[in-house]
Amino acid sequence: MSQPSLPTRSRLGGGVRDAYTATRRFLIRGRRQPDVIFGSVLIPVIFVVLFGYVFGSSISIPGGNYRAYLMPGLFAMSILFNSNNVAVAVATDMSEGVVDRFRTLPIARSAIGVGRSVSSLLLGVPVLMVMILCGLAVGWRVEDGLGNAVLAFLLFELFGFAIGWLGILVGLLAGSAQAADVIISIPTFLLGFISSVFVDPSKMPTWLRLIAYWNPMSAVVTAGRQLFGNTIGPPPSGVWSLDHPIVTTVGLALLIVLIVVPICVRLYSRSTR
Amino acid sequence: MSAPAVLAKHLSRSFGATRALVDVSFEVRGGTVCALLGRNGAGKTTAVRILTTLLRADGGSALVDGFDVSTQAHQVRTRIGVTGQSATMDELLTGSENLETIGRFCHLGAGAARRRADELLRQFDLLNAGNRLVKRYSGGMRRRLDLAASLIAEPNMLFLDEPTTGLDPVSRGEMWAYIRGLVSAGTTVLLTTQYLDEADRLADTIVVIDRGLVVARGTPEQLKSSIGRPFLRVTLPDASGAATDQVRQLLGDEAEVQGRSVSAPAADGLTTLSEVVGQLRRLGIATHEVGLELPSLDEVFSSVTDHSAGPEPSPTPVGGEA
């Protein structure tokens, strides 16, 4: 491992500066990929139409509007998909030799990963804005005050930050962009669909229902619904993570960050190939 | 004498069952150019990746500028410039943005990074392309930008992994000129190459690597004289018997005929060449081509690596890829 050569305070300052430089680089790149931007805006819009109207016409939620129930789920899904993009982008980066160049520079070992995750959050903000506008257009409303709604989005972003690092981990380990895409797409779909993101799990078979209830995505979405005041869905289930969705989401995000970030930093620091 | 700029001792590294480096030791003195010469897959790149802190060695140790690449990676990284084999520039950034990003990573500060980027773009004749995306650069421009990028922090020690592989002859000559310029300014260079002529032109010392082992080392002159003599080859317009016989007699006892060309050792190099050309003209023999061929990399290997590879090295043209 590299040894600290600078006093702690300036190392921290250097780390922040390196992370800023890396973020800046990823943002410039992000701006120059109009196809990726177009895709990440278009897919959520398609989802709103597809689930809000195509499937939604046949889905009834006790006591309310399915599209109001759906929108917090789609916000969380767009964040989940963002981590897919991160995994593919990181794997691409690794195969191109750019990261090797960065590795030979005297930068903080965390800089590239932090830059990647922060920039992907920032690039996700416009997508979320489009989703919010779509949601408002199809009848979703903030029903528990703007403050709580802001908290809900901050919670989603925290969760997005954490699973963004999972995306980075997959990208670092996958070996190729295609492999990264496959490896992360499967859990993404399972997490997204076997949950309360799109439907009320209470009508699922028992074994599937248990999985859906304990699925972290259900906790994240339930937290969002509570904070938005979109609590028109199913009654509480008696599952701890759903009874305390905010605590669960924050705890889970911190746990992922604590475990995954150090691994990613190590992987970024040296090559194995 | 001062401590060597690079000191590699018994480096080894395997990837699964493949032993990329078995046991490689060498040193590079400050202010000189050392070439690691070897075929694809010989272990050159692995050695450079270990020395530039990109990869850990399984065994052995290495010091760069007196710092251990394994335990003092950060110090090593502040002292070296690296140009990798694969493109290490961001395609979606302009040349100028790429250099600026690296300048900021080297802690120059935003303004200084910009100024240094401009300076290097000018130095490498890329000023007009500075605001163009790198994906629109030609191969030669990319290599120049890569080299410029490794010079941002003005390192004393430069690692160049196959700096001219895949370049056309003109770009290749330009790269050589840039590298020579850096060396004359006092930079120590470790480069890898598959081309004997490149090592010959640029390096003070050559370390020949094959299958993860050092099989020969020395100055270009020492190496070439240990490997063999240059060959003279006369190619005739056609394989007609009479002219071939005449040329074979002219070239002496060791002459060998292969199709329409005749070759023989040229003990005195250029002197032999000019004598033969003079005699060919006097005898009125029309030739397609007359040339001197240096010992090839194949000969280096067949003479310094295992002998089962072939007892009699056949002369093959050197610099055919140049």
Image: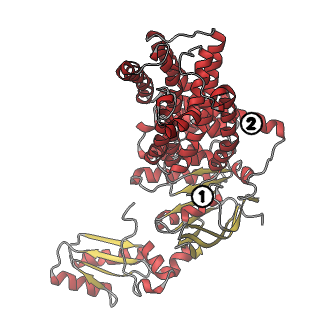
- Residue in the picture at 78% in, 63% down: B2
Quadrant housing the C terminus of chain A: bottom right
Image-quadrant location for residue A54: top left
| Residue B244 in the figure: left or right of residue B129 | left
The circle on residue B49 is 1
| Chain of the residue under the numbered disc 1 shown in the image | B
Q: CA distance from mark 1 to mark 2?
A: 25 Å
B262 versus B151 height, above or below: below
The circle on residue A47 is none
Q: Nearer the viewer, residue B135 or B13?
A: B13
Looking at the rendered structure, whether the residues under marks 1 and 2 are on a common chain is answered as: no
- Residue in the picture at 23% in, 72% down: B287
How packed is label 1: few (under 14 Cα within 10 Å), some, or many (20 or more)? many
Image-quadrant location for residue B47: bottom right
Q: Is residue B202 visible?
A: no
Q: Are marks 1 and 2 in contact (CB under 8 Å)?
A: no
| Chain of the residue under the numbered disc 2 shown in the image | A
Q: Which residue is mark 2?
A: A14
Instruction: Assign a secondary structure to mark 2.
Output: helix
- Residue in the picture at 41% in, 42% down: B138
B122 versus A172 height, above or below: above
Q: Position of residue B230 (x, y in %)?
A: 42, 77
Q: Is residue A151 visible?
A: yes
Amino acid, disc 1? Arg
Quadrant housing the N terminus of chain A: bottom right
Q: Nearer the viewer, residue A17 or A41?
A: A41
Instruction: Assign a secondary structure to mark 1.
Output: helix
Q: Position of residue B189 (x, y in %)?
A: 62, 57
| Residue B140 in the figure: left or right of residue B30 | left
How packed is label 2: few (under 14 Cα within 10 Å), some, or many (20 or more)? some
Amino acid, disc 2? Gly
